[in-house]
């Protein structure tokens, strides 16, 4: 440095103090870019090198210590397992429906629940918030949403609360490499993710540091399958090469999945989200597909009797192993694929009364002592919004808030004192406050409590009952992307 020669920074005595903090600084910088402003917490810096250690290669012991520190830091922000299905009851629980790549609506939903302030910081105190899945697809802010939720998980824990983020059918679809609901802005979002990751890896290499969290590799089985298929089809070989033509850039690797990045390419998305991929391991592998807080069970689609018989803990564990890449390569576990799985079922979430099977819900709850109700997303509840059915045994919270799903106003569900009071909350942008309203639909014995608590808050309950016959005719406008014909509008309940 200063003499016209370029040398690795960690071999230069004048940069001895820079080397230990360089990697964490780059991680924080890249993560802030991904999060669109909301910085996450980087791993702690490694220890300063002392005396004769300048310029030497790390020993096996040093490498082990560094790996242990990084593992501990990662565990603080993203635990490796979903944890127990059954969690203690909380005084206040807030349930948030499908987000689908819309950062603006996600922020407004969290504000409606009294969980974050105008700067996006956690103010929910000891509240337990549950986001019921579907962070991905149908929007262009998917990466930023995952980083926002990761940051809020830590802030909630620090404040004595908890944010539980679940996997829905769109997370499992993406891990399985099925991108039919990924809109063009979402495809580009992951292309940008790849570029920022490689930027971080290159910056770390300048200081003699390994890519670490800035790598794009990890989904080995998926990468090998892509190359085998390309070879079988006679497609030309693609390699990721550096300027010298001899080696891939830092953080990358040879192979089609890591190098095919042209406009519209889904390879960066696959590299990030396939089983064992860096985004899959960091954000999705520890997210449950079913969880209970006190007497309330949460699932994206719904829990059916055969799920209870199979074992809810087992379902979470096997799904997590598949996403981490620890399971045998193959299709997704059966309990997260198909119309009767926990992330796809709609048995008691249809807005139309004649389609809602309260009997199957009752049989499922009979096998779960202590569980009184289920909260589900997945099926858009419009025009009614957050509502109840089956005498309050199911609460439906997917309101289609994302612009990719109709763009409805965000609403969230509030459960107080383990079900003693239930209400829905929406954000009043003009008034700058959350408005508390009764949950419509069939609440059974809890209806009186809800209306009374809302009346005390100064909100007038609706005078007219919901016309169920009109709900039978109501369908939800959403947007889907067809890869062959481009954008098209269609009516859908997905």
Image: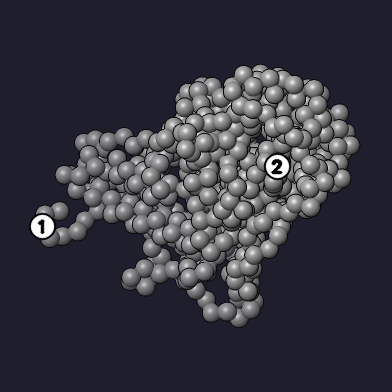
Residue 217: image x %, image y %? 49, 56
Residue placed most toward the observer, 300 or 84: 300
State which mark lies toward you, 1 or 2: 2
Q: Residue furthest left?
A: 3
Q: Secondary structure at mark 2?
A: loop
Q: Earlier in the sequence, mark 1 or mark 2?
A: 1
Tell me which colouring the rendered structure shows. Answer: one colour
Any mark on residue 222, and which? none
Q: In percent of the image, x 10 and y 57: which residue is there?
A: 3
Q: Residue furthest front?
A: 463
Q: Secondary structure at mark 1?
A: loop
Residue 413: image x %, image y %? 64, 32
Would residue 346 be seen by someone viewing this image from the given angle? no
Does residue 346 appear to the left or right of 251 in the view shown?
right
Any mark on residue 3, and which? 1
- The residue that label 2 is drawn on is 384
Residue 84: image x %, image y %? 67, 29
Residue 179: image x %, image y %? 62, 61
Mark 2 neighbour class, 10 Å CA radius: few under 14, some 14 to 19, many 20 or more: some
Q: In percent of the image, x 58 and y 44: which residue is there?
A: 409
Q: In percent of the image, x 67 and y 41: which residue is there?
A: 385
Q: In percent of the image, x 86 and y 28: which residue is there?
A: 366
Residue placed most toward the observer, 280 or 146: 146
Does residue 55 appear to the left or right of 376 in the view shown?
left
Asked if 474 appears above or below 54 in the picture, the reply is below
State the count of labels.
2
């Amino acid at each position: 440095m200063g003499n016209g020669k370029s040398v690795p920074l960690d071999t230069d005595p004048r940069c001895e103090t820079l080397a230990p903090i360089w990697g964490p600084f780059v991680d924080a910088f890249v993560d802030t870019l991904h999060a669109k402003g909301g910085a996450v917490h980087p791993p702690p810096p490694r220890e300063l090198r002392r005396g004769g250690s300048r310029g030497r290669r790390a020993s096996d012991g040093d490498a082990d210590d560094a790996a242990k520190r990084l593992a501990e830091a990662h565990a603080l922000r993203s635990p490796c397992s979903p944890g127990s299905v059954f969690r203690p009851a909380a005084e206040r629980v807030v349930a948030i429906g499908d987000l689908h790549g819309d950062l603006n609506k996600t922020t407004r939903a969290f504000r409606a629940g009294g969980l974050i302030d105008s700067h996006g910081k956690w103010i929910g105190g000891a509240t337990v918030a549950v986001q019921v899945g579907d962070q991905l697809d149908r929007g262009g802010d998917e990466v930023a949403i995952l980083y926002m939720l990761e940051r809020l998980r830590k802030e909630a824990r620090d404040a004595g609360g908890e944010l539980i983020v679940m996997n829905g059918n769109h997370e499992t679809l993406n891990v399985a490499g099925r991108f039919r609901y990924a809109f063009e802005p979402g495809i580009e979002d992951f292309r940008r993710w790849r570029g920022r990751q490689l930027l971080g890896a290159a910056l770390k290499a300048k200081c003699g540091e390994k890519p670490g969290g800035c790598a794009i590799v990890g989904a080995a089985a998926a990468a090998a399958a892509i190359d085998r298929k390309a070879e079988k089809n006679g497609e030309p070989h693609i390699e990721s090469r550096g300027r010298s033509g001899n080696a891939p850039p830092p953080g990358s690797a040879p192979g089609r999945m890591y190098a095919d990045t042209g406009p519209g390419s889904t390879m960066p998305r696959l590299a990030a989200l396939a089983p064992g991929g860096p985004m899959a391991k960091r954000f999705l592998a520890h997210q449950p597909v079913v969880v209970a807080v006190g007497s309330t069970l949460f699932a994206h689609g719904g829990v059916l009797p055969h799920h209870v018989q199979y074992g809810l803990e087992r379902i979470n564990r096997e799904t997590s192993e598949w996403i981490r890449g620890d399971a045998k390569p193959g299709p997704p576990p059966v309990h997260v694929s198909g119309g009767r799985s926990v992330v796809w079922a709609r048995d008691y979430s249809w807005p139309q009364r004649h389609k809602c099977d309260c009997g199957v819900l009752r049989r499922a709850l009979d096998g779960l002592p202590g569980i009184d109700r289920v909260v589900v997303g997945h099926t858009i509840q419009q025009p009614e919004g957050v509502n109840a059915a089956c005498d309050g045994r199911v609460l439906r919270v997917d309101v289609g808030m994302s612009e990719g799903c109709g763009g409805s106003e965000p609403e969230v569900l509030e459960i107080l004192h383990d079900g003693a009071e239930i209400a829905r909350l929406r954000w009043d942008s003009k008034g700058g406050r959350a408005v508390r309203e009764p949950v419509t639909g069939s609440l059974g014995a809890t209806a009186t409590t809800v209306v009374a608590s809302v009346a005390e808050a100064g909100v007038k309950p609706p005078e007219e009952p919901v016309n169920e016959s009109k709900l039978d005719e109501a369908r939800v406008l959403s947007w889907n992307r067809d890869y062959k014909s481009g954008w098209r509008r269609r009516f859908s309940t997905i």
